Amino acid sequence: MDNAIREVVLTLTANLSMNERYTEFLNVFARITGNHACALLRYQDGLLIPVATRGLVPKVLDMQFQPELHPRLSVIMQSRAPVRFPVNDPRPDPYDGLLSNDANGTIGVHACVGCALYNENTLFGVLSADSLEAGAFDHIEDSVFRIFAALATVSLRYESYINRLEQLAKHRELVASELVNENLQRSNQTLGESPAMRKLSGEIDIVAGSDLTVLLLGETGVGKEVIARIIHARSPRAEQPLVYVNCAALPEALAESELFGHVKGAFTGANNDRAGKFELANGGTLFLDEVGELPLTIQAKLLRAVQFGEIQRIGSDKSHRSDVRIIAATNRMLAEEVKAGRFRADLYHRLSVYPLHVAPLRERIVDIAVLARYFLNQARVRLGLVHAGLAAETVEVLQGYRWPGNVRELEHVILRAVLRASSIRGRSVILEPGDLDLAEKHETVKQVESVMPDVKDVSLSQAVDEFQRQLIRTAYLEEGSNWAKTARRLGVDRGNLHRLAKRLAIK
């Protein structure tokens, strides 16, 4: 028996296909128990499905057995011990007439033993043995059947586990492929036709093919994330992940874990090992948006990752190499932030290897119509419209607006206008000036101009801070001290507004 067990184990772990392993397993099982026919069935979705048989006709492998229609299989499934059926048991054997040496299908099974294959409370299948001789299994102890059943259970469980892993891997591969395709599609967004954007496109072509760190500079909403996606899509890393990190949204207590990961038990709540963004982006690109908002404590650790490509999970004493291309973006004047002591000079120089400035929309009026038509077509597709266009007067209005929210604001204005117009005029619309909701925003521009600080004898950074401070206070008071409405009015994320207000000592 020991030799048989050793043979079974070697068979189930041999470099064979699963079908070959199961066939050899049943051969050993038949030799030890002396059965004429045996079968290994997997329990799946309420059915017993044969995965391997011996001594049965080939068509059995194409059959499915409903336990409620086969009393013997049902009894076997409900037992944790081997079930032996007496020769005069009235319940029909599921393999009667299906033995391979029964050409006429008239020979009935005279001895039958079955074992349910349980792992704890999970049923994986059934192992059965049949013989044409009555009492053929009387001399074999239950322990023998238990051993074969245990080995079969481990094998089926292993196969199920591998199948799930393969399905998960395939799913993740498909998801990754879809993300790459989405990234490529989004990277096709037009930049514009102005001299500034043509120059920027040329700069992108120059830097995209390298692994140099890029720092994107520009006001909020100018499209820095779009530029990052274009750089990634034009790089040799295009088929690898582009991982986005909003540094302004990272709580200081969790920022290190988000970026570099942690090991189980590193801190309260760290119940499992967790990879950080650097590890997720390995081989691809890591986009650090709003990098100027990172706390100084995190900046020091980020510097090492950028400088040496080494990361260390919280709670671990091991360093890991990370092959990541860094693209950072900020709406801050980082050089001024360095002078003010709010940003590390060494990190600034590491990030600004290849700086790219993205001009605000008000400085490239020629791009407004191009971008408006691009967003208009996107809205048409999203809303299922037949046709969508811009009246000449509408283009003039768009070009006469200052766009404090830049490209992002233009996108939202167009989407709202198309939605509003289509609800009135149906699936074919031409946007008129009245469809736009710019009047309130013109008023906001006047308010912005009215809160311009006195910039005499102050640095640019101080002037910007004072301007933001006065603008936020004015909007906050006029919105009834409601932060959510203030954020919507200013066109910023509410969480970012709260953090900015705290930094400016407004709250």
Image: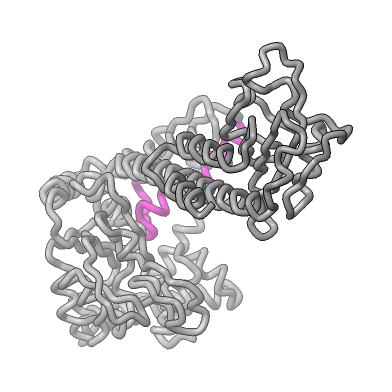
Q: Residue at x 66, y 13 (%)?
A: 103
Q: Residue at x 89, y 32 (%)?
A: 90
Q: Could you tell me how many numbered marks the image carries? A: 0
Q: Is residue 471 left or right of residue 279?
A: right
Q: Is residue 329 left or right of residue 50?
A: left
Q: Residue at x 41, y 73 (%)?
A: 250
Q: Residue at x 48, y 41 (%)?
A: 433
- Which residue is nearer to you in this view: 462 or 74? 74
Taking 2 as reference, is 480 above or below it? below
Q: Position of residue 418 (x, y in %)?
A: 52, 39
Q: Residue furthest front?
A: 139
**Residue 218 falls in image quadrant:** bottom left
Segment tinted magenta in the rendering: 399-425
Q: Position of residue 241 (x, y in %)?
A: 32, 52
Residue 441 on the magenta span: no
Residue 423 on the magenta span: yes
- Which residue is nearer to you in this view: 56 or 428? 56
Colour convention of the picture: one colour
Q: Position of residue 361 (x, y in %)?
A: 30, 53
Q: Position of residue 151 (x, y in %)?
A: 55, 51
Q: Is residue 416 left or right of residue 89?
A: left
